[in-house]
Amino acid sequence: MKYYIFTIIFIFSLFSLKSQTTEEEQIKQIREWYAQINEKIKNLVPIKYDMSYQTTEGGTLSVYYYDSEIILLEAEFYGETGNYKSYHYFKDSNVFFIFTVKQLYSAQINAPNNSVATNEENRYYFWDKKMIRWLDPQKNKVSKDSEAFKKEEIKILEYTQQLENITIQNNYD
C-alpha cells in the first residue's frame, strides 16, 4: 500500500514539475511570440493616433490589431534634443515584451551636422503579468531582487497601461 501511495505522489510531482517552466524556457517562448507578431504585422495596417500634444516635436501611437486584439503598440515621441520609441507586444491581451529606445542628439534637432550622440535600449520580458527579466542599456540582466527592477516594472507597466487607455479612449470618441 505504501508503494502505491509513493508511486502516486511521485507521478503527481512529475506533472507539477513539467507544468513549471524555467525562465530560459519562458524567454524562448517570448522570442517565438515576438517573431510571430513581427511576421503578422507585415500584412497589417496600423491605426495611428496623433500624440503631438505630449512632446515639443510631435509623436505617434501606432496600434496593430489581429482578430480585434491589440498585438503591438508602437509609440514614438520626438523632442528638440532626442526621441523616444517603445514597442509593446501582446498575447491574449497581456504584454509579454517591451523594447524601448531613447536617443539623444548631439545638438538640437534642426542644427547642422546633428547626429545621434547616445542610444539607450532596454528590453523587458513578462510572464503571467510579471516582469521576469530586464536587460538594461548595456544588455546586462538587472537583478529581480533589486529596488531598481521593482520600480522599473511598475513604471513600464503603468506606461503601457496609459498607451492602452489612449486606444480605448479614442475608440469611444
Image: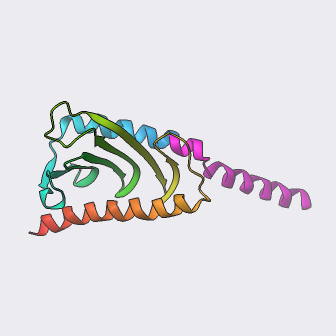
Q: Residue at (89%, 56%) from the top-left corner?
A: 3
Quarter of the picture holding the N terminus: bottom right
Q: How many marks?
A: 0
Q: Describe residue 61's horizontal placement relative to residue 128 as left or right.
A: left
> Please, which colouring scheme is shown?
rainbow
Q: Quadrant of residue 107?
A: top left
Look at 11% across and 55% down and name the residue there.
50
From the top left corner, tell me how far across and down residue 160 is, in percent: 33, 59
| Residue 4 lies within the magenta run | yes
Residue 45: quadrant of the picture: top left
Percent x, y for residue 79?
20, 50
Which x, y percent locates residue 67?
Answer: 23, 50
Q: Residue furthest right?
A: 2
Q: Main secondary structure of the magenta part?
A: helix
Query: Is residue 173 one of those drawn in magenta?
Result: no
The residue range painted magenta reads 1-27
Q: Is residue 150 above or below residue 135?
A: below
Closer to the camera in the image, 110 or 17: 110
Residue under the image location 13 percent in, 55 percent down = 49
Q: Is residue 1 left or right of residue 151?
A: right
In the image, taking residue 116 as reference, residue 129 lies left or right, namely: right
- Quadrant containing the C terminus is bottom left
Examine the rendering and report whether any part of residue 31 can be seen: yes
Is residue 128 in view?
A: no
Query: Measuring 13% from the left and 64% from the top, which residue is drawn there?
Result: 170
Near-viewer residue (118 or 75): 118
Along the line of sight, the residue nearer the viewer: 103 or 50:
103
As drawn, which residue projects farthest toward the top? 113
x and y percent of residue 52 in the render?
Answer: 13, 56
The residue lying toward the viewer, choosing from 84 and 5, is: 84
